[in-house]
Image (spheres, rainbow, N blue to C red):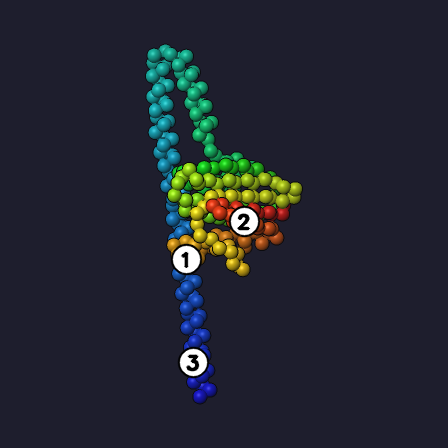
Amino acid sequence: METVLIIGLILIVIFIIYFLQRRFQRNLVQTQADLLKEHTEEVENIYRQMRGWRHDYKNHIQSMKAYLELDRIDLLEKYLSDLDEDLVAVDISIRSGNVMADAILSSKLSIAESREIALNVKAEIPSNLTIQNIDLGIIIGNLLSNAIEGCMTIQKPEDRFIRVYIIKMKQQLYISVTNSMAQPIRKTLAGYQTTKSGKEHGFGLKRIDQTVNKYDGYVNRQHEEGVFATEVLLPL
């Protein structure tokens, strides 16, 4: 009888381990698929911008050639002046002082713009960071991915916004991301969890927490009706 009971317990343990492994594999595959979809969208958006710039470049060259052929240097000078102002107006590249942060911010914010999300961004990152670039990328990337996802739960584009503020504050790097949202959200003992397609979804939040904890930093999240805000403090 004892032998049968032991065998039964062993089989139960094996089944539980097998079940947990399958569940982990499914979650891992889904996470990889989500990341691949997100990166693919970012690359496609960059390609669309490049095609637009190429098209505009050709038109500008043709216009300037026409002014030269007509010997209208005055019109050419005005055209160049207008073009210079136009380039300044459309320049949304981020120059925070950190190449990794600039690349991620520019990529994510480009996606946000394509989804008609209003942006307000200020980023000044000191050069003497003790934080590894890849970890900084994990924090900023996940913050903005979550913010974009939250904004897209809002039907009206005019109600979507993301505010990003990154600056050195005393001896800490302060990162703040605030976004509009109309997404069901609840706070448990384990932290905030959002509902995505009927399932709990908090992988990005966990990655942020894990990375911040690595540097003995601090994360503060606040949720009010229609707005979600995250503050991160990282010792320098």
Where residue 78 sits, quadrant-wise, is top left
Reading the image, the residue beneath label 1 is 199
Gap between marks 1 and 3, in whole Å? 33 Å
Answer left or right for 158 relative to 69. right
Q: Position of residue 125 (x, y in %)?
A: 57, 39
Foreground residue, 227 or 53? Answer: 227
Tell me which amino acid carries mark 2.
Gln
Q: Secondary structure at mark 1?
A: strand
Query: Which one is closest to the eye, mark 2 or mark 1?
Result: 2
On the picture, is 39 further left or further right than 99? left
Residue at position x 44%, y 70% in the image:
17
Mark sitting earlier along the chain (1/3) = 3
The quadrant of the picture occupied by the N terminus is bottom left
Residue occupying the far top of the picture: 71
The quarter in which the C terminus is drawn is top right
| Type of amino acid at the residue the image marks with label 3 | Gly
